């Protein structure tokens, strides 16, 4: 058995024993999530003649959480990979920590949380857990917060190194956190049961260059935005706006923005329809000293810009960054508490005009459309089966920015089995 797994099991036994001896609570949650995928144009459009691929990936996660009136702790270890990628006799297993943090409550809603943790705020557009990806997303950070009935506020602080440095060394960001430092402030106000509003500010210290050479040249980019949410018995209205400024890793001045609006209407207990629009500014002249392309940073991009992940989850910013306008119409059918069916249609276009970048271009702004269908089925307690099928209809503009062939059939299908039981051991 690998040493990290041994250590995790020892910690679990110690905390479980402690929970039985005092007014404490200890919980263990396990997850095995396997997902089979058929890719015939997912992530990146395929060229004519490209063959489809099929694979199965798995997340095996073991988490434990300890709670006491003056202390909270969580450890979460996981192994992720594709079926068949490891030899039958494995000498160097891949085991990583997804979460490892402590939280100290100080009464009256105040707390301090430190360690490896997931940061998820509002709809996870800028900071999210990225649960669709088997590895997920985490940050090594310090959080100082207040949680009240009406309002909440968090201060986020992070400072990253890839190694324990010595004289003459500095930060490498290849295969490490993508930023050197982060300071963030989040505030949320519940004005009523129907209306909430929040503010998020992030200041990121970014290392310039290609990320492989030690560097002390830092540029700071700021992101500031608000989220608004209004709910009634039938309506759920959501709006957000963010603005970015400062400098990016390419040493360009940043002036970028995004806005989004979404409306959910509950027709009855079975049907809900959704209308949404997301606009992210783009860059017509990327070689100049100012960047107008908005970067959604460390959010859960799979949730927003189409299930096939053509945009922002797959290098869209690094490929001429033309911006994105995504208009969406969706419907959800909830047959009962165990069965949900969903369908969404996306219409994609750039927010910059290709004719301004290439004066002789005849390309339009449309990058095509995508249709996403999915289902979610609760088979039994802690066992869930889900799946989906998506098709993308491309255009010459999509081909210009994303590659592939607009004449090739682009589709993707997946089926996932998620088993996630949890056990409590407590004595109060």
Image: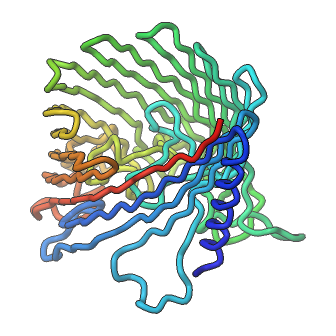
Seen in the image, is 46 located left or right of residue 155?
left
Q: Position of residue 277 (x, y in %)?
A: 29, 29
Q: Is residue 43 above or below residue 267?
A: below
Residue 210 in view, yes or no: no
Q: Residue 328, located in which quarter of the rendered image?
A: top left
Question: What is the residue that sits farthest to the bottom in this orientation?
Answer: 89
Provide residue 278's location: percent of width, then percent of height: 33, 32
User: In the image, is 21 to the left or to the right of 277?
Assistant: right
On screen, residue 173 versus residue 133, left or right, reads right
Q: Position of residue 304 (x, y in %)?
A: 33, 40
What's the residue at 30%, 36% (across, down)?
325
User: Which quadrant holds residue 355?
Assistant: top left
Q: Residue at x 56, y 15 (%)?
A: 189
Towards the viewer: 20 or 94 = 20
| Residue 74 showing in the rendered view | yes
- Name of the residue lying farthest toward the right: 167
Between 194 and 312, which is closer to the camera in this rendering?
A: 194
Residue 230 position within the rendered picture, expressed as x and y whole percent measured from the top left: 38, 14
Identify the image quadrant of the C terminus: top right
Residue at the spot x=20%, y=19% of the render? 266
Whether residue 130 sits left or right of residue 94 in the image: it is left
- Colour theme: rainbow
Q: In the rendered view, would you say 44 is above or below 143?
A: below
């Amino acid at each position: 058995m690998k040493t990290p797994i041994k250590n995790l099991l020892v910690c679990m036994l110690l905390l479980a024993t402690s929970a039985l001896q005092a007014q404490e609570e200890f919980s263990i949650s396990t997850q095995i999530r396997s997902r089979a995928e058929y890719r015939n144009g997912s992530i990146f459009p395929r060229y004519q003649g490209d063959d489809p691929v099929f694979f199965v990936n798995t997340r095996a996660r073991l988490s434990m959480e300890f709670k006491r009136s003056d202390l909270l702790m969580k450890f979460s270890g996981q192994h992720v990979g594709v079926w068949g990628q490891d030899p039958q006799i494995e000498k160097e297993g891949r085991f990583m920590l997804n979460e490892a943090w402590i939280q100290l409550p100080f009464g009256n809603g105040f707390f301090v949380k430190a360690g490896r943790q997931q940061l998820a705020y509002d709809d996870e557009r800028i900071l999210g857990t990225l649960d669709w990806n088997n590895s997920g997303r985490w940050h090594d950070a310090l959080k100082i917060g207040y949680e009240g009935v009406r309002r909440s506020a968090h201060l986020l602080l992070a400072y990253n190194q890839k190694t324990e440095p010595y004289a003459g060394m500095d930060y490498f960001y290849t295969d490490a956190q993508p930023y050197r430092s982060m300071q963030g402030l989040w505030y949320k106000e519940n004005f009523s049961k129907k209306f909430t509003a929040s503010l998020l500010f992030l200041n990121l210290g970014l290392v310039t260059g290609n990320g492989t050479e030690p560097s002390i040249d830092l540029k700071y980019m700021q992101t500031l935005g608000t989220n608004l949410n209004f709910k009634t018995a039938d309506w759920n209205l959501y709006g957000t706006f963010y603005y970015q400024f400062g400098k990016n890793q390419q040493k360009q001045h940043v002036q970028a923005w995004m806005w989004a609006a979404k409306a959910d209407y509950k027709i009855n207990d079975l049907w809900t329809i959704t209308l949404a629009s997301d606009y992210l500014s783009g860059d017509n002249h990327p070689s100049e000293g100012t960047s107008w392309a908005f970067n959604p940073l460390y959010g859960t991009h799979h949730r927003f810009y189409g299930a096939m992940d053509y945009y922002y989850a797959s290098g869209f910013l690094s490929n001429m960054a033309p911006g994105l306008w995504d208009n969406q119409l969706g419907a959800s059918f909830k047959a009962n508490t165990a069965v949900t069916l969903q369908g969404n249609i996306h219409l994609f276009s750039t927010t910059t005009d290709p004719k301004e970048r290439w004066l002789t271009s005849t390309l339009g702004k449309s990058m095509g459309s995508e249709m996403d269908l999915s289902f979610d089925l609760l088979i039994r307690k802690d066992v869930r089966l889900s799946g989906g099928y998506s098709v993308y209809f491309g255009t010459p503009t999509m081909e210009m920015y994303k590659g592939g062939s607009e004449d090739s059939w682009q589709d993707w299908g997946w089926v996932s089995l998620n088993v996630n039981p949890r056990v409590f051991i407590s004595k109060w």
